[in-house]
Amino acid sequence: MKKGPETSIIMNCHNGEKYLSEAIKSVFSQTYKNWELIFWDNGSTDKSKKIFKNFKDNRLRYFYKHKKVSLYESRNSACKKARGDYIAFLDVDDIWFSKKLEWQIKKFKDKKVGLVYGKFYKLNTKNFLRKKQLITKKNLPVGYVSKAILEKYSVGLLTIVIRKAFIKREKEIFRVKYNYLGDLDFVLRFSLKYKFDAVQKPVGLYRQHENQMQIKFHKTKAIQLDKWYRETVKSKAFGSKENLNLFEEWNRFHSTSTLIKTKNYKQAIINIFNYPFNKNKLKLLIMLTLPEIITKNIIGET
C-alpha cells in the first residue's frame, strides 16, 4: 500500500487573500480524502500566508518564494514537491465541488489515461445577463482528443488531474515562455501523447476577473499566440495534415476574434472578408456587429 498522499493539489498564490479561504474550504469539502495541498506562495505581501496557516491539517504544505516569478514557473516548482501519484490544480480564486476528486481519481483505473478533466462553471461578475455560465453543455471528448480540442477547446485547468508518472517524461510541464498560454500549450501537447477521460458534469467554478477582459491583456496574448502558432507549426507537433488544417483554422479564428476584442476593426473586417464561409465566419460577424456582453451569451467564449 502506498505511503503518503495519493493525490497532490497544487495551489499557486500571489496576493490572493480575497477568495483564498473559500478555495481551501472547497478542498476540505472533498469526499475523497487521500490528498495533500501544496500551497506555493509566490511572494505575497497580503494576508494570504496568515489565512492559509489558520487551517490546521497535516496534509497542508506551505512553500514561500521570496522573489516573485511567473505563474507557470511557480507551478512547475510546486509540481516538483508533489508526493502523490496524481496532480491536480486549484487557483486561489476558484472552487471545487465536493465530489470532484472522488469522481476523477476512479477514471485512472485505466492505466492508459494520462489526464482526467470535467465540466465547470465560469463566474463573470461583469456580465449582468449571465453571471454564472456552464462551459459546454455537450459531452466532453474522451480518448485521444487532440482533434476534438482543436475544434472546440473547453478544458479548464481547475478541472484537470494528471498522472504524475506521465509528466515526469516531459522536460517542462508548463513552458514558462508562454505565460499567457501555458494551460492551452500543456493540454494540447499532452493530448497528442496520452489518453484523456472526463467527468460529464460540473466539478468546479472558475472566476474570470476584469484584467482578463482588458484590451492590453488581449493584445499581449495575441502576440504570444502568433509566436506559439508559428513555433508549433514549425515543430510539426501536430503530425497529420488533418490536424494541421484544424490547427490553422483554430488560429485563424482566434487571431481574428482577438482583433475584434482589441478594437482593431479594420484588420478584423479584412480577415473576415477573406475568411471561408463556415460557422466560424458567422461567429466572427456576430462578434463584430454586436456588443461583447451579448455575443458571449449567443456564441459563448472564444
Image (cartoon, rainbow, N blue to C red):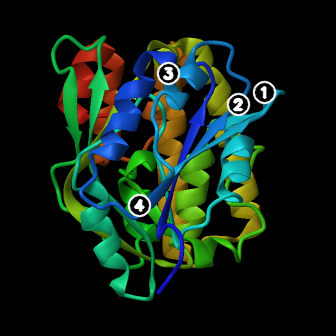
Say which residue appears at 49% left-offset and 73% top-offset: 242
Q: CA distance from mark 4 to mark 1?
A: 32 Å
Say which residue appears at 35% left-offset and 50% top-offset: 154
Q: Earlier in the sequence, mark 2 or mark 3?
A: 2
Badge nearest the viewer, 2 or 4: 2
Q: CA distance from mark 2 to mark 4?
A: 31 Å
Identified by mark 3, the residue type is Gln
Q: Earlier in the sequence, mark 4 or mark 1?
A: 1
Residue 212, numbered label: 3
Relative placement, left or right, of 182 versus 197 is: right
Say which residue appears at 68% left-offset and 60% top-offset: 173
Q: Secondary structure at mark 3?
A: helix
Residue 32 coordinates in the image, percent (x, y): 29, 61
Q: CA distance from mark 2 to mark 3?
A: 20 Å
Q: Earlier in the sequence, mark 2 or mark 4?
A: 2
Q: Secondary structure at mark 4?
A: helix
- Residue sitting at the far right: 67
Relative placement, left or right, of 215 versus 90 is: right
Identified by mark 2, the residue type is Asn
Residue 178, numbered label: none
Badge nearest the viewer, 3 or 1: 1
Q: Secondary structure at mark 1?
A: loop
Residue assigned mark 4: 149
Residue 68, numbered label: 1
Q: Secondary structure at mark 2?
A: loop
Quick one: 252 or 150, which is closer to the camera? 150
Say which residue appears at 25% left-offset and 23% top-offset: 295
Residue 42, numbered label: 2
Q: Earlier in the sequence, mark 2 or mark 1?
A: 2
The quarter of the picture where residue 107 lies is bottom left
Residue 240, relative to residue 146: is it above or below? below
